[in-house]
């Protein structure tokens, strides 16, 4: 039996790459889908109708789909995307906030337009597309919905030349943690994915790093993200919320969330002399903690 029969999903930025693969997997599991994509270039400029091809492929798999070409970067776009789902399928159960662009530059060279474009598509895009759904959940008392957000190691670890993208992607992880608390009473789960895959956003970066791109290698391709995202949409994942799931290079993992790993307290205001001792000691403890986590986190074969 298909696990998502009767469910309605919106996938943003679904005309290519990771979003497209998620749509095809959702379709195989029986979901009806709004395929959103502005169809622009990698930097977000222009537009096109790439969503149409994905709709066609979904229909060939026997599921229902409609295309939407709005931009996630405006409130109006987010409302239109949501309305496409209501018009076609009368409700929404699953939202995959996936649309993305890149404007890589160091901060020395970054123009305001590069900063704003990234914030509008990634961070504000999550607000624009998610608010209509959470209002729908509240107003119709819709239970067991799923919201899945796309972060990146760029935001979670940091990456040279991506202060705009990294800030937005770290913000998305924070958005997830707070939203998970707000929608818990409707048994709606909210999770973050940290994906890694060869797509038009990354193939040149992979090759520039001296690695060979092989389109037949699933451990490089965007198809590896799809089953992980779709599983989070199934009943089996009812209790999984506020997590950061990592899927990259054929590896499935869970990320650590920010946590205080060691702390001190005192009766009086800290003195600089105390801090001379305590802060280096805390940093040293963190180093051991990181080494331990790195060892525990190394992939184990299943
Ligand atoms: N590929 C990776 O290794 C990787 C790593 C970390 C995070 N991500 C994230 O995963 C998501 C998918 O990336 P991808 O690698 O599949 O890239 P992609 O370029 O193949 O697909 C992204 C899609 O989003 C669409 N899009 C861009 N701006 C839009 C807008 N304003 N409104 C609607 N659609 C818009 C594009 O037209 C494109 O089809 C992005 O959020 C990206 O930041 C990807």
Image (cartoon, rainbow, N blue to C red):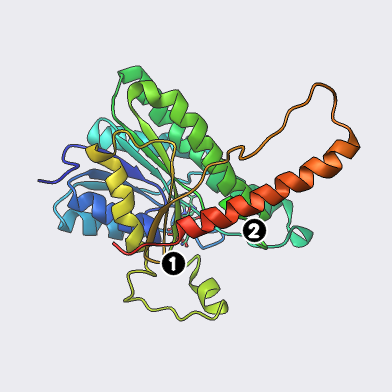
Circle 1 crowding by C-alpha within 10 Å: few under 14, some 14–19, many from 20 = some
Q: Nearer the viewer, residue 19 or 68?
A: 19
Q: Sequence order check: which comes first, mark 1 or mark 2?
A: 2
Establish whether ligand 1 lies closer than 8 Å to the Cβ of label 1.
yes
Residue 70 shows in the view: yes
Label 2 sits on a secondary structure element that is loop
Q: Is residue 287 above or below residue 177?
A: below
Q: x and y percent of residue 287 in the render?
A: 65, 54
Residue 255 horizontal/vertical position (percent): 48, 49
Q: Is residue 127 visible?
A: no
Q: Residue at x 64, y 58 (%)?
A: 162
Q: Which mark is residue 199?
A: 1
On the image, the x and y values in percent for residue 35 come to 33, 49
* 101 relative position to 288: left or right: left
Q: Depth check: 54 or 209 in front?
A: 209
What's the residue at 37%, 65% (across, down)?
250
Q: What secondary structure is found at the residue carrying circle 1?
A: loop
How many neighbours does mark 2 have within 10 angstroms: few (below 14), some (14-19), or many (20 or more)? many
Image vertical order of residue 144 relative to residue 170, above or below: above
* Residue drawn where x is 58% and y is 46% of the image: 170
| Residue highlighted by disc 2 | 162
Which residue of the protein is positioned furthest toward the left in this rendering? 1
Is the C-beta separation of discs 1 and 2 under 8 Å?
no
> Residue 160, located in which quarter of the rendered image?
bottom right
Depth order, front residue of 99/176: 176
């Amino acid at each position: 039996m298909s696990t998502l029969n009767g469910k309605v999903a919106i996938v943003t930025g679904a005309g290519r790459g990771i979003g497209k693969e998620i749509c095809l997997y959702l379709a195989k599991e029986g979901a009806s889908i709004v395929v959103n994509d502005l169809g622009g270039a990698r930097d977000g400029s222009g537009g096109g109708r790439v969503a149409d091809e994905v709709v066609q492929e979904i229909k060939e798999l026997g599921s229902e789909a409609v295309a939407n070409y709005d931009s996630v970067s405006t409130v109006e776009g987010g409302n239109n995307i949501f309305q496409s789902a209501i018009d076609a399928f009368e409700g929404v159960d699953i939202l995959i906030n996936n649309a993305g662009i890149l404007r890589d530059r160091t901060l020395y060279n970054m123009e305001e337009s590069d900063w704003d474009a990234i914030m509008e598509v990634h961070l504000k895009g999550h607000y624009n597309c998610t608010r209509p759904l959470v209002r729908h959940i509240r107003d119709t008392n819709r239970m067991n919905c799923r919201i899945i957000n796309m972060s990146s190691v760029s935001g979670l670890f940091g990456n040279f030349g991506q202060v705009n993208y990294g800030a937005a992607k770290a913000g998305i992880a924070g958005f997830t943690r707070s939203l998970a608390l707000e929608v818990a009473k409707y048994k709606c789960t909210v999770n973050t994915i940290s994906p890694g895959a060869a797509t038009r956003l990354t193939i040149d970066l992979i090759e520039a790093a001296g690695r060979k791109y092989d389109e037949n290698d699933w451990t490089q391709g965007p198809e590896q993200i799809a089953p992980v995202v779709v599983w989070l949409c199934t009943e089996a994942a009812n209790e999984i919320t506020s997590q950061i799931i990592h899927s990259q290079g054929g590896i499935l993992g869970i990320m650590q969330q920010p946590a205080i790993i060691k702390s001190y307290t005192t009766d009086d205001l800290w003195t600089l002399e105390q801090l001379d001792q305590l802060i280096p000691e805390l940093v040293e403890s963190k180093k051991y903690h990181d080494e331990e986590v790195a060892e525990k986190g190394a992939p184990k074969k299943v």
